[in-house]
């Protein structure tokens, strides 16, 4: 086999290898088998990866005693969420949830962990003009969630920014062929939190439709539309998405008009593209477009920063399993079957290259 034909694989291998770290990781936790039947303690249960969105967490404000946001676990002890509305880490508790029986989605159990640190994206705190496009933070738990089974529930991220960009472009231009969800909770105060059954969404093409809808004011405000379109049209650069609820025209805001869905991950055909950031209330607007809009910031602009946070707070708990004489990297704890660690990915690519080389000698 010619070396030239191997270059794409070798390039990926080099990239994956370059990102490996020699960080000393904690000892993998003991593996606890999942409980049979309803958990004994519904307010402090172990979370299992084999569930409905088990990596979605709620951000609970200790002072107001309500959820003020959502998030998605990206490592065994860190989750990505929005940025602008949060203050100090000691103000919040991360609430994990586990739908122990898929036929009983309204009877989940929960678990709480303290938030130890909040890493806000630098451009979120730099200026209100950039905060809209960099509304991201990563919250780090004081201790990981207690789990059952071998795998920490972690949201699947694309392997590369290129893959993410292609997904965004596809979904933004194929609205009628896209199945997407914003898995948020149904109320601000219910604990254990229950997912809203009406959280399915459909895309509103960003540049051809959504910019006009976002920038329209009722009543009209002189100069605002032009300024808004210029700002979103130029700065968004394909990194923003818009969605509307399939089953409800109105987005039910929280106390004080708060968009407490912020930080909810956007999933299109199981692919994570970004997080919900803001809502556009279009109730009472003239014309046909009176459905409220979820404004989503994708991971594209913050990709290097996000991957750095993910790497810093990951643990290499991987193991190897032999299946029909083939070595398959199987995650132990800080991994997702759909998103193997970089080390496992590099090893897998290396094995593919070696195998192809030998079969073509």
Image (spheres, grey):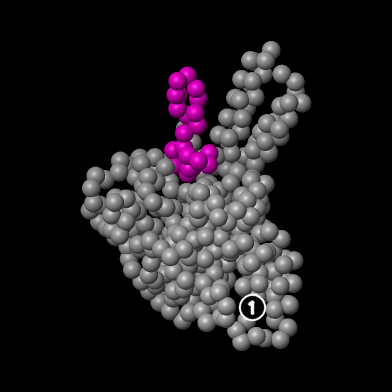
Question: Residue 176: x and y, percent?
Answer: 55, 55
Image point (50%, 31%), residue name: 329
Can see residue 191? yes
Give the quarter of the figure containing the N terminus.
top right
Question: Residue 29: x and y, percent?
Answer: 39, 42
Is residue 236 in the magenta section?
A: no
Q: Residues within 10 Å of mark 1 (few under 14, many from 20)?
A: some
Q: Secondary structure under badge 1?
A: loop
Residue at the far top: name it.
361
Q: Which residues are magenta?
A: 320-340
Residue at the far front: name it.
287
| Towards the viewer: 237 or 244 | 244
Q: Is residue 225 above or below residue 191?
A: below
Image point (44%, 62%), residue name: 199
Question: Residue 238: x and y, percent?
Answer: 68, 59
Instruction: Report the residue marked by disc 1.
Output: 216
Q: Is residue 310 above or below residue 355?
A: below
Image point (59%, 39%), residue name: 342
Image point (44%, 56%), residue name: 56
Question: Would residue 311 be found to the left or right of residue 144 on screen?
Answer: right
Quadrant of the image occupied by residue 232:
bottom right
Q: Is residue 138 above or below residue 258?
A: above
Can see residue 87? no
Give the quarter of the figure containing the C terminus.
top right
| Towards the viewer: 73 or 274 | 274
Quadrant of the image occupied by residue 204:
bottom right
| Towards the viewer: 53 or 141 | 53
């Amino acid at each position: 086999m010619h070396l030239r034909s191997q270059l794409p694989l070798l390039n990926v291998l080099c990239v994956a290898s370059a990102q490996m770290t020699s960080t000393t990781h904690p000892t993998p936790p003991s593996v606890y088998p999942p409980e049979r039947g309803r958990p004994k303690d519904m307010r402090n249960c172990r979370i299992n990866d084999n569930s409905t969105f088990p990596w979605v967490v709620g951000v609970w404000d200790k002072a107001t005693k309500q959820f003020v946001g959502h998030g998605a676990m990206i490592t065994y002890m860190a989750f990505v969420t929005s940025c602008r509305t949060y203050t100090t880490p000691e103000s919040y508790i991360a609430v994990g949830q586990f739908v122990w029986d898929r036929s009983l989605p309204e009877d989940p159990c929960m678990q709480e962990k303290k938030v130890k640190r909040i890493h806000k994206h630098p451009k979120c705190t730099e200026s209100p003009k950039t905060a809209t496009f960099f509304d991201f933070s990563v919250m780090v738990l004081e201790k990981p969630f207690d789990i059952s089974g071998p795998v920490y529930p972690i949201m699947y991220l694309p392997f590369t920014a290129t893959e993410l960009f292609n997904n965004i472009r596809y979904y933004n231009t194929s609205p009628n062929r896209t199945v997407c969800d914003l898995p948020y909770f149904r109320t601000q105060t219910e604990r254990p939190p229950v997912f809203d059954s009406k959280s399915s969404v459909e895309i509103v093409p960003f540049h051809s439709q959504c910019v006009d809808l976002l920038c329209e004011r009722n009543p009209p405000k002189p100069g605002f539309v032009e300024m808004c379109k210029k700002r979103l049209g130029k700065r968004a650069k394909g990194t923003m998405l818009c969605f509307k609820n399939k089953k409800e025209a109105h987005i039910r805001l929280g106390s004080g008009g708060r968009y407490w869905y912020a930080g909810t991950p956007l999933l299109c055909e199981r692919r994570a593209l970004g997080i919900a950031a803001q809502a556009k209330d279009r109730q009472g607007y003239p014309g046909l477009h009176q459905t409220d809009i979820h404004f989503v910031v994708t991971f594209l602009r913050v990709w290097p920063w996000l991957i750095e946070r993910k790497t810093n707070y990951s643990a290499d708990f991987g193991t190897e399993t032999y299946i029909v004489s083939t070595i398959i990297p199987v995650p132990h704890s800080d991994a997702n079957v759909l998103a193997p660690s970089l080390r496992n990915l590099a090893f897998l690519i290396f094995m593919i290259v070696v195998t192809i080389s030998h079969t073509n000698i």
